[in-house]
Amino acid sequence: MKCCLLRSLCRWWDKTPISLTASGGISLYNVQIKRLPGNEDIPLPQKMSLLASGFDLYAAVHEPVTLEPGERGLIPTGFALAMPAELEAQIRPRSGLALKHGISTLNSPGTVDADYRGEIKVLLINHGSEAFTVGRNTRIAQMVFQLVPQVQLIQVEELADTARGSGGFGHTGTN
């Protein structure tokens, strides 16, 4: 079968186009979102510009949460997702919060697997020097969708040599 125009939508090993209904009839470009009870006032994730790659996420806290410097907190968003098997959602920091307040996501990017159906939550950390309060409807992070190749690991006794070899952290220098 001939590969589709967008190479990333083909299986890399045989160039077969990916099924657009591989996960229970959910289209590759249509991700189902469910607003959870008690969060009708929380905006659903949304892109803030036409070509933005990420959807801004809003805090669904019932009471303000204050993060002291060095403190972390798990912040609910008030929604859950259903996405096709070929996708993952990545939770990433918002650049403005990082620059102005030192607020970031601790496990960045956070991964939401296609088979997870619980509430999306964001693990924030305060790297700043002052306390930061997360209120209801505060934009706290962004969510970016990425294709996930299905990889099979094959155990071998030896690996092929490369010029780099086993050089790791700091091996290539800074200049």
Image (cartoon, rainbow, N blue to C red):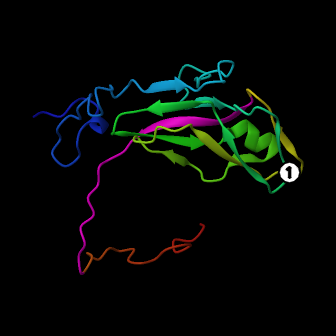
Q: Position of residue 72 (x, y in %)?
A: 74, 52
* x and y, in percent, of residue 73 in the image: 73, 48
Residue that label 1 marks: 68
Q: Residue at x 28, y 26 (%)?
A: 25
Residue 163 is left or right of residue 49, and the answer is left
Q: Nearer the viewer, residue 124 or 117?
A: 117
Residue name at image x 52 percent, y 39 percent: 118
Quadrant location, the C terminus: bottom right
Q: Tag count in the figure? A: 1
- Quarter of the figure with residue 19: top left
Residue 108 covered by magenta stretch: no
In the rendered structure, the answer to whether residue 66 lies left or right of residue 54 reads right
Which quadrant, please, contains the N terminus?
A: top left
The residue most toward the left is 1
Residue 151, compared with residue 119, is above or below; it is below
Residue at the right extreme, as displayed = 130
Q: Is residue 104 left or right of residue 109?
A: right
Q: What residue sits 43% from the left and 39% below the top?
A: 146
Query: In the image as oriented, which residue stretches furthest toward the front?
Result: 37
Q: Secondary structure at mark 1?
A: loop
Picture coordinates of residue 122, whole percent (x, y): 64, 43
Where is residue 82 shown, x and y percent of the image? 42, 32
- Which residue is more in the foreground, 38 or 127? 38
Q: Is residue 78 above or below residue 147?
A: above
Query: Of residues 42 and 101, which is closer to you in this image?
Result: 42
Residue shown at 85% from the left, 51% from the top: 68
Point out the stretch of residues depicted in magenta: 138-157
Crowding at dot 1, Cα within 10 Å, few <14 / some 14-19 / many 20+, comes out as some
Mark 1: amino acid? Glu
Comparing 166 with 37, the one in front is: 37
Q: Quadrant of residue 159?
A: bottom left
